[in-house]
Image (cartoon, rainbow, N blue to C red):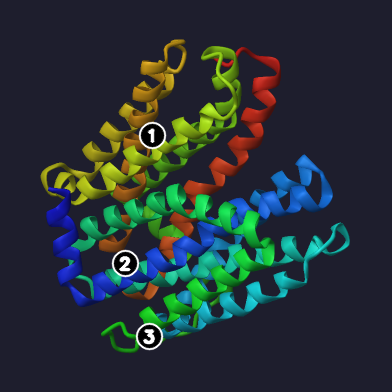
Amino acid sequence: MGGSAVVRVLRDRTAGRCLAGVVVSGFGTSAMWLTAGIWVKSLTGSNSLAALTVCAMWAPVPAGPALGALADRMDRKALLVRGNLAMACLLVPLVLVDSADTVWVVFVVLVLYGASGLLLDAAESALVAGAVPASLLADFNGLRMTANEGMKLVAPLAGAGLYTRFGGPAVALSAAVTCALAALVFARLPVRATPRPPAGGRRGELSAGLRRIRASAVLRPLVTAGAATMLSAGVNGAVTFAYVDDVLGRAPAYAGVLYAVQGAGSVAVGLLAGLLLRRLPERVFAAGGTALFALGVGARAVPLDAVALAASAAIGFGLPCVLIAAMTAVQRETPDAELGRTAATAGSLMTAPNAVALALGAGLVAVADVRV
């Protein structure tokens, strides 16, 4: 079933090449995501600064609607090509980082890298919605999730190995190469240039995506459910190491096993999402996934390894459902002229709570039992 979804997407030239671009660029991004923290830790000895590398990449999320509006004003194919080339150039200065005194360069690059990623995600979502047949959107979004989660399993290990052998600059340059390759893939997309929409008030442009979501009986509940689920997911993620220690009585490294199982669950749902969304209404698919996620989180109160593994798989399978359903609905329900900003706004609304909840969960675990 999952294989047929892959075949359907790869047979479509635009969908197949978009997915290839996502895989290539995602590998470099995932490798940098982990390696940046290791790099900063090794240069400064500070756990706090190492943790801030993740915050640096998340910092531009509130600017998502503005970046989405920019994506709507430009030719999306050209933006994907030039944006990936710009990201490749952006990573090159990291070769100069060799001491605690130059570690600030890492944070500047990560913030700009995160902002560029938001802009390109908006452009890609809008381009896919206009160029890929509507019948393939759910399959594409599911496989995109599979690709992203698969990269999170493979790329950090490759990045860590490359860092150990050759150092941080080698990881930065390899990530730059993947961005350049992604630009080449997107340059070969068989799509025409998209016309710019008429210029309007800047404030109206920035709020257009939010107004579109609020006014839609389809989008509003899905995006709201996605935000609420990601808030819970952030708290759950923040207490993972406390769960491993206090509930399971395992060493911290066991968290890696749970993350791998959770990633496998996300890969599986990505392969099945298209099939399930053709048979289930989006709300039912999203609600079922959220319920499965809740069941997995609740099961973590049980101090058994078998339950822990099953719970991680359930969390990995259930959590992406509402995100896939919401983004597919955004692509289907939104006019092309507003698609970039609406997709970016929906993405910001659903991901920002996760960043807030990571901090909230870190505080809660210090004052409450992790089972609570």
Residue type at the position of mark 2: Leu
Mark 2 crowd level (few <14, some 14–19, many ≥20, 10 Å Cα): many
Q: Nearer the viewer, mark 1 or mark 3?
A: 1
Query: Mark 3 or mark 2: which comes first in sequence?
Result: 2
Q: Quadrant of residue 110?
A: bottom right
Residue type at the position of mark 1: Val
Q: Which residue is mark 1?
A: 261
What's the CA distance linking mark 1 and mark 2? 23 Å
Q: Residue furthest right?
A: 101
Q: Is residue 216 left or right of residue 227?
A: left
Name the mark on residue 187.
3
What's the CA distance linking mark 3 and mark 2? 13 Å
Residue occupying image coordinates x 81% and y 43% = 46
SS for dot 1: helix
> Can you see residue 153?
yes
Q: Position of residue 72 (x, y in %)?
A: 44, 76
Name the mark on residue 164.
none
